[in-house]
Structure formats: structure tokens, C-alpha cells
Amino acid sequence: MTLPLYGTASHSAGFCSDKARSVVRLRAVESSAERHAADFALARTSVEVLRAIEANWPSIFVVSDGSIDLPSTFDGRLVAVPLKYNYLGDGDVLGFDHSSKKFRTLFRRNSAHNSFLITERCNNYCLMCSQPPKDVDDRWILSEIKESLPLIDPATRALTFTGGETLSDCEDFIAVLTECRDRLPTTAIQVLTNGRAFANSEIVDAWKAIGHPNLMAAIPVYASVDHVHDHVVQAKGAFDETVLGILKLKDRGQRVEIRVVLHALTAPIIEETGRWIARNLPFVDHVALMGLENTGFAIANDAMLWMDPMDYSDGLAKAVDYLSAAGVNVSVYNLPKCVLPKSVWPHAVQSISDWKNGFVDECNRCDEKNNCSGFFTTGRPRFSRGVRAISSPHHEFDSRGLASTASGE
Ligand code: SF4
């Protein structure tokens, strides 16, 4: 099931008209934490609404499909959303548009998978982009994020910034990261970027100057062959800029992850790409070899991109071997265990964000379900012909090292 992270409020009241949007933080009615102007008491029943009013909450956020009984004396801010947003909890942060009543969940305190979209603009146009670029003025998003940062639990373990190209408005975004350094110094900050901006030494120097103790740039290099990478991102010269950017970041001691998304244009040469990274960029901090999320442009380009992971598993295993042998920290993301050679299992990570992660019926019989990435629920999911439940006590491996169909046949 995909968690609904945005929607339209069924009711709202009390918002001033001198501002188009507000950032809202939800608080348990009985919370004793210091109240911020953005805080709303979170109520799910009429009784909780009355308790919030008794506790002098000036703003109330109701999650309910029922009618809301508010005393006529209440003149504070109110937002009501349908029950399907019942996952919302204490400490969560939302962006709310006053006139349209549209809202987006920006941060879920109990999730390990929080990401902020920085912009929909990008100077790449990747064939499998899950967030197809739009040439729009969406700089208000950065302002919303700046407003959100003071509301985020400082104990948050990890936060991702994504796009579009996150460095599109470089100066403003670096200011956001600098604020993360001050407000969230123990949070692991990951920035998804195409890396081309780092070909500019001034930008790399500004990045270094942020000085966040746990900041990582996650940069895609889709192939060891320049024209393949440039074709995938639909931008001539992108490979050269991206690799130059990675070299400049590492030259300045910055943390870099290389990401390779596996599909029919990149997976057939993943062995060569893995070997090339191992030989030329062994100093990067992490390499993620990633199964494709079949959404966005990937759906439109499905005929060009889909490749069953069973058909590239040998090359993937060799790429992992090359990288491991070179001492590179390598992970495999988004691919279920049953389609991976056994040698790859120690590198397979449960990487799919909780709000878009699911399993199929076959998985209910599988002993590895708790250690498996499962599948994306977004877009139009594609399933490998190799998906079979694994039975731990009996599972065997064939000559290629692939998990056998222990209980599936
Ligand atoms: S069958 Fe098991 S290994 Fe395969 S996708 Fe389902 S849980 Fe994962």
C-alpha cells in the first residue's frame, strides 16, 4: 500500500490572508513540550477536540471522517483531514496551502525515510526519472523547508533532500544545508544531485564550507561509458561534468555516494561499470546499485527500459565482487532477495521508503520477508519471473548461485 502523503483538507478555518501557506507541526493534545506558533493539537475524536480546547491549544488538527463538534467559542486555527491520513502523529510536519486547502506531509517523526523535495527543475532529463522535471518557479519550496527545519525533531537519524536537481538554486540550498548543520548536527543528511554543479570549483568550496559532520552527496553515474550515461540523462557532456564533480568533492574530503540505476540500458554493462568504478573511483564512500522504480518517465519508456533482474544477476554479482575486492562499500537497493545471487545477499538492503513499499502474496510464505526489500508500490510495478518464496531450512542454490524455488514449486 502507498501511504497518501498529500491531499486536500475537508475543512479549514482561522488562517490569516496575508500569507498563502503555513507550515504546521502536529502535537499530541497532552504534549508538555514547549509550544511553537506552528503547533496544532492532533485530535481524532470529538472528546480529544474538547480536551485540546480545555488545554488552551490555539490550533487544532483533526483526523476524522466524522463531523467536527466545535464549541462556538473556539476561534483558533483548524484543519480537518480524512481518516486515511490517520498515520499522522506527534511531531509530524505538514505544508498547508490556505486557499486550496491542499497539504503535503513533509516530515514523519516515526519514519526512517524522510525526504524533502527541493525543486522539480533539473538540467538532466533522465529516461527513467521518477520525478519528471518541470520548468516552473517553485522557489517557494525552499522557503517552506527553511520554515520546517526548526520544527524537526533534532534526534532525527536521517534526512534526504531530493529533486529535480537539488543544486538548481545553489546558494539558497546551501543556506538550508548550513541551517541543518546548526539545527540537526547529528542527523545524516543525504543530498540526491546529478553532481554536474560540482564541476564548478566555487560550488564545491561552498559545499565544503557547510561543514555538516554527516553530509553525503549521492550522485548517479549510470555507466562507465560516457555516451551511455549522457543518453540516459539526455544531456551531452553530463558524464564529464559529473565525474569531474565527484573528483573535486573527494579532493576536498567530502563524502560521495555513487548510484547506478539498473535497467535495459545500464544493466547489460553493469559488470564493466562496477569494474570501472572500482579502478577509477575506489575512494568514494559508498556505491549503490539500484533496481528501477517503475514510475514517472520509466512507465512511458517501459519498452526501452524494463529488464528482468534475473537477466542481469550474473553481471550484478561480478560488479559487486569487483567493488568489494577494491574495498568499496557497495550496496544493492530495491531488488528482492529471491532474484539475487547468494553472493549479493550480504549487500542487499531494505532500501525502499516505508510509504511506498509492499510485497506480493508469494512473500507471505517466504522466510526472508523480514530481510527483503520487497517492491515499490508506486507507478506500475514490474515483477521479475524469479520471485519465489524462500524457505530457509531447505533452500538450495543452483550452479549460478541463484536461490532455488524452494517452496514455490
Ligand atoms: S518471495 Fe521472499 S525474497 Fe522474494 S520478494 Fe517476496 S519476500 Fe522477498
Image (spheres, helix red, strand yellow):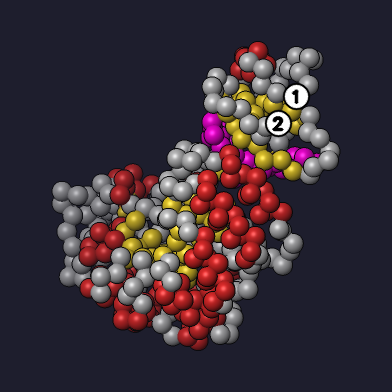
Q: Is residue 64 visible?
A: no
Marks 1 and 2 in Cβ contact (< 8 Å): no
Instruction: Establish whether ligand 1 lies closer than 8 Å to the Cβ of label 2.
Output: no
Asked if residue 265 lies in the magenta stretch, the reply is no
Magenta residues, as a range? 83-106
Q: Is mark 1 within 8 Å of ligand 1?
A: no
Q: Is residue 173 visible in this depiction of the protein?
A: yes
- Place of residue 362 in the rendered image (x, y in percent of width and height, measured from the top left): 35, 49
> Residue 49, how many percent across, how many down?
65, 18
Q: Amino acid at mark 2?
A: Val
Q: Nearer the viewer, mark 1 or mark 2?
A: 1
Q: Which residue is mark 1?
A: 76
Q: Position of residue 37 (x, y in %)?
A: 67, 32
For mark 2, give the secondary structure.
Answer: strand
Within the magenta stretch, is there residue 96?
yes
The residue beneath circle 2 is 79
Q: What residue do we see at 79% from left, 44% from top?
A: 20
Q: Nearer the viewer, residue 129 or 144?
A: 144
Q: What residue is drawn where x is 72% and y is 54%?
A: 140
**Image-quadrant location for residue 118:** bottom right
Farthest-out residue, right: 17
Task: Say if 346 sits above or below 271 in the image.
Answer: above
| Residue 53 x %, y % | 67, 16
Q: Amino acid at mark 1?
A: Gly
Q: Quadrant of residue 255?
A: bottom left
Q: Is residue 157 left or right of residue 147?
A: left
Quadrant where the C terminus sits is bottom left
Q: Secondary structure at mark 1?
A: loop
Q: Residue at x 37, y 70 (%)?
A: 284
Horizontal relation, residue 306 to residue 85: left or right: left
Compared to residue 64, the image places residue 288 above or below, namely below
